[in-house]
Amino acid sequence: MFKANVGYSVDVDPKAAGKAAAEAAVAGLDDVKVAMMYCSCDYDVDAVVAGARSALGDVPILGNTSFTGVVVPEAGFVGGDEPFVGILALADPAMKVGVAGMSRDSAQSPYDAGRMIATKAKAAVGAEHGPDFFYMAASSGEEERYLKGIASVIGRKPYFGGTAADNTIEGNWKLYANDDVFADGVCVAFFYSNAWMTNLFKGAFDETDDFGVITKLDGRRRIMEIDHVPALDKYKEWTGFTDEQCAGANLLATSVTSPLGVKDRLGDLVAVRHPMSGNEDGSISVGCDCAEKTCIIRLQTTVDELVESVPSTMRELMAKMPGRPVAFHLVHCGGRRAGIGDRINEVADAIKEVAGDVPFICEFTFGEYGFQSDGANTVGGLTLSFTGFSE
């Protein structure tokens, strides 16, 4: 029978925090197959992992640092000014989970890294074929390339997860898989299970009538022109935002309620592209890959709607699930969390109310991963990737 439990700690000692969170997460569970851990970048993360491993024994562990905190059933939002650890433990005698991780410098390309880590994850459980579904965490910048490499080995399998985050957007994030801790790379958990994994991946933004074609890119994440006009000029024309609001890193916060999006080929999903920086050459740096000659749309919302979107998305997820929920893994964008600000406790209370007695953990990421029925696995920003497990 599939079961889950959550543990957390705010102990100032990183090793003690990791151990306490792990002990609480596995309490009362048999046949624990994986521990998914999210902690503060302000800790010595190696020590957190060592503490958790000391309590978990041979149970695989993986995860990443989370932006400013986590939400857990017992305490709601934990973090803020104090370091934190949260762990979701999943147990099922009929389930196998292959965990693997590797730093970016272990492969010539992110695509190669994806291929290598997929092979390692299968080997961890002696599997010849791909998983029923999988989880991925990665560092910012090459998520789509890792995903392509993984898919080249296992085919198209549904996935969920998110990009490691720090508290200041300075690259202080960490990822970990078992004993390996690194800043730049990727880790995965391959699930071989009869349980159902249901994912709901959405930005919960409204489309506007402001849209245009990306006519020039520099690389994959720097939009130079929209409709042959400097991208930043086009964005300011659409929004009415001032030069100061859109200058440099100011655009990151300015655009939380007015980001950009690209539709999938069926129109079922708008993958959000969060403007990260307004550059002096008139370009806009975004948080996920884009392609020339595709349409990009301005989206909009309000802070009130950012708050309400969390419980409404959870209810929508539960309506999609084929059976009774056993656990929730909630990936909430760190940019949305920053936009919500001090109202994060409203979000935490809403999660607790909707989840009821179902164990859950909510992390805050710098990129979100999920899928839509009949569409490809997707990487987005300013997004909610909410996953439910049911028997």
Image (tube, rainbow, N blue to C red):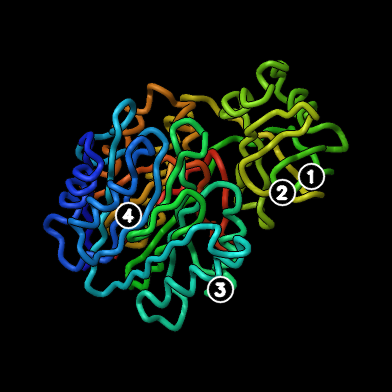
Q: CA distance from mark 4 to mark 1?
A: 36 Å
Q: CA distance from mark 2 to mark 4?
A: 30 Å
Rendered-image quadrant of the N terminus: bottom left
Earlier sequence position, callout 2 versus callout 4? 4
Q: Residue at x 39, y 43 (%)?
A: 65
Label 3's element?
A: loop
Q: Are marks 2 and 1 in contact (CB under 8 Å)?
A: yes
Label 2's element?
A: loop
- Find residue 264 and report its image quarter: bottom right
Q: Where does label 3 land, which residue?
A: 155
Residue 128 placement, left or right of 235: left
Q: Which x, y percent locates residue 231?
A: 78, 33
**Image depth: mark 4 or mark 3 in front:** 4
- As drawn, the label of residue 217 is 1
Earlier sequence position, callout 4 versus callout 3? 4
Residue kind at label 1, given as amino acid type: Leu
Closer to the camera, 46 or 136? 46
Q: Where does label 2 land, which residue?
A: 220
Residue at the extreme bottom of the image, as rendered: 128
Q: Are marks 1 and 3 in contact (CB under 8 Å)?
A: no
Q: Height in image: 361 above or below 251?
A: below
Q: Height in image: 126 above or below 361?
A: below
Residue kind at label 3, given as amino acid type: Gly
- Find residue 356 and report its image quarter: top left
Q: Which x, y percent locates residue 240?
A: 72, 19
Q: CA distance from mark 2 to mark 1?
A: 7 Å
Within 10 Å of disc 1 (Cα), the crowding (few <14, some 14-19, many 20+) is many
Q: Are marks 4 and 1 in contact (CB under 8 Å)?
A: no
Residue kind at label 2, given as amino acid type: Arg
